[in-house]
């Protein structure tokens, strides 16, 4: 997708306004406008089975090592510490196996539903609920809808936007891009692409306020913001360019001369990572100039589906 990136100044970012195609809006209203997640039970069962087998293999290996041990003389004087360590290990392995085996009875008990009123997701028995009229602007920053990676929160990117919670306060809504909140219940939804498209469409067509989307949202979701059709190539190029951006830092780490002060090595690593990130940004800007900056969306006059 090619286009003109939004103009920027030192104090403001001017969003690029895109019109949602009429046929996309018409399709959104078909069947009552609701999209429900279809859990992939087979993939989830395979994940649980693999984890159970892994924990069981560790337990059997440790048990075999204990039985085959023929010389315990090196434990004299440390019996108490060894016993405590063994109990902790047995408890950890046993607890992990017990938890995983229990999860087999909860397979598929995760859901998500997106319709004209709002969204329900999470545990079937106690789902989280969001009404579209609760979605609001952020107080600071230029993006109301963005994707974010926080290592302390998760190892996958999350879709982030805000909701009003009363008293003039707002709260973050953070959803994994896989749209599942418990991988041991639902590893993934078979119709994840349709769900993510429906969610972004509902957010994009809110009349008040008109939300500001980071362009990276559509790269990560694999959706063309102009046509709302699948767009997978930019995401693949972003991953490849991100890996390539690590090469300068790897070169510094592996080829740093022995004996040089470690402080200079750290400084060189930081500079190499900055240079790699800048190169990645430049490459993506050159290849996809229309996928930069901030987007807003407008819809034709008339009621939405």
Image: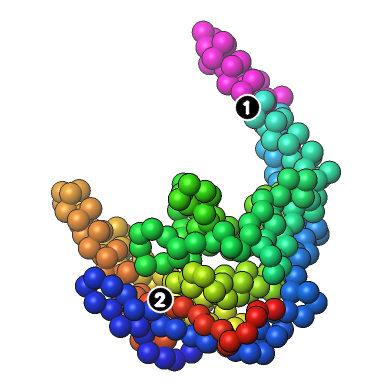
Relative side of 18 to 104, left or right? left
At x 77% / y 80%, what residue is drawn? 30
Q: Which residue is mark 2?
A: 294
Q: Compared to 256, does 198 lie above or below?
A: below
Point out the image quarter for the C terminus.
bottom right
Region of the chain picked out in magenta, as a range: 66-90
Is 214 covered by the magenta stretch?
A: no
Q: Compared to 115, does 283 lie above or below?
A: below
Under circle 2, the secondary element is strand
Between 102 and 162, the one lying in front of the other is 162
Helix, strand or loop: magenta stretch: helix
At x 74% / y 56%, what residue is drawn? 111
At x 67% / y 61%, what residue is drawn? 119
Q: Which residue is mark 1?
A: 89
Q: Compared to 197, does 38 lie above or below?
A: above
Q: Earlier in the sequence, mark 1 or mark 2?
A: 1
């Amino acid at each position: 997708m090619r286009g003109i990136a939004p103009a920027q100044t030192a104090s403001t970012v001017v969003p690029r306004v895109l019109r949602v195609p009429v046929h996309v809006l018409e399709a959104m209203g078909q069947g009552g406008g609701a999209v429900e997640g279809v859990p992939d039970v087979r993939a989830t069962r395979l994940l649980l089975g693999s984890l159970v087998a892994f924990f069981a293999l560790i337990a059997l290996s440790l048990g075999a090592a204990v039985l085959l041990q023929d010389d315990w003389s090196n434990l004299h004087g440390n019996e108490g510490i060894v016993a405590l360590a063994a109990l902790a290990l047995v408890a950890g392995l046993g607890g992990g196996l017990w938890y995983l085996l229990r999860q087999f009875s909860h397979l598929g008990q995760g859901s998500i539903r997106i319709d004209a009123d709002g969204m329900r997701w999470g545990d079937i028995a106690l789902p989280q609920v969001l009404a579209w009229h609760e979605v609001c602007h952020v107080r600071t920053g230029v993006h109301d809808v963005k994707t974010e990676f926080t290592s302390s929160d998760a190892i996958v990117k999350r879709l982030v936007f805000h909701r009003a919670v009363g008293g003039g306060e707002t709260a973050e809504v953070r959803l994994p891009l896989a749209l599942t909140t418990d991988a041991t219940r639902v590893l993934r939804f078979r119709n994840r692409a349709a769900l993510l498209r429906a969610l972004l469409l509902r957010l994009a067509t809110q009349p008040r306020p008109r939300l500001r989307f980071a362009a990276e949202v559509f790269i990560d979701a694999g959706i063309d913001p102009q046509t709302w059709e699948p767009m997978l190539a930019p995401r693949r190029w972003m991953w490849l360019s991100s890996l390539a951006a690590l090469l300068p830092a790897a070169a510094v780490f592996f080829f740093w001369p022995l004996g040089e002060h470690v402080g200079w090595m750290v400084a060189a690593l930081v500079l190499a990572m900055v240079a790699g990130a800048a190169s990645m940004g430049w490459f993506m800007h050159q290849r996809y100039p229309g996928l930069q900056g901030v987007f807003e969306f407008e819809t034709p006059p008339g009621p939405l589906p």
